[in-house]
Amino acid sequence: MTAVSPVVKPVSQMRITPGSTVNIQDISWEEFESILQELGEKRSLRVAYSKSTLEIMVPLPEHEKSKDLISDIVKILLKIAGKSYEPFGSTTFKRENIAGVEPDACFYIQNYQRMIGRRKLEPNDPPPDLAIETDVTSKTTLDAYVAIAVPELWIYDSKKLRIYLLRDGHYIESDNSPNFPNIPLTQIIVATVERAWQVGTVQALKEFEGALERSSF
């Protein structure tokens, strides 16, 4: 009997419908690194890796709007709070042999000075102080953030913002952000995202900034 070899196609040739997620089990760290090189940096799909599972997701168009809007909201919050920062977008963060993840957006706040001028991450660089994900509910992605040790993670999904804080190796859900204390983010960010669909992004951000400047937060 003739042995039949499995047909193996590069991940870059996979056709994944926008809004879909594909999980591939039993992926080694070396295979994960190879897949990242194959996919390159200029791509629409996103990946997460944890516990030998590779997750590949292709965002919907509305995902991109929410991502950009919430990133702009964070910049306004930081400006009004008088905090310096370094944005690192969708950089791939890794913990060698354990996990890798690509936020929709992320910010260095407490550690911003250390990251000034960085064109690529170095092995001993800290994780971002704040990471943002939209439309993410998978355990693979959350496990990857725990392994990378991102101290604060925001997840916007189904018109709801959840704030997660890393405590003793686990994420706990919180009503408040240590980076923006006393601001009801879970209410005002959701309202601003919904407002942007009604009046446009620029107008919604203007209204958001004006409301913050007039508030007593």
Image (tube, rainbow, N blue to C red):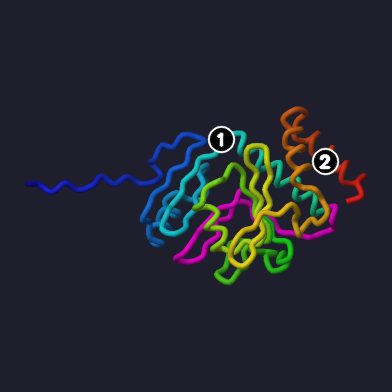
Q: Residues within 10 Å of mark 2 (few under 14, many from 20)?
A: many
Q: Is residue 92 left or right of residue 212?
A: left
Q: Position of residue 181 (x, y in %)?
A: 81, 57
Q: Position of residue 90 (x, y in %)?
A: 59, 51
The residue under the point 48% across, 66% down is 96
Task: Judge whether 64 appears above or below 114 on screen.
Answer: above
Q: Which residue is mark 2?
A: 208
Mark with earlier residue (1, 2): 1
Read off the magenta span.
80-105
Is-magenta flag for residue 88?
Answer: yes
Q: Position of residue 94 (x, y in %)?
A: 52, 62
Q: Place residue 12 in its image quadrant.
A: top left
The residue under the point 46% across, 49% down is 55
* Farthest-out residue, bottom: 124
Q: Place residue 110 in its image quadrant.
A: bottom right
The residue under the point 76% across, 32% down is 195
Q: Amino acid at mark 2?
A: Phe
Asked if disc 1 and disc 2 are in contact, CB closer than 8 Å, the reply is no
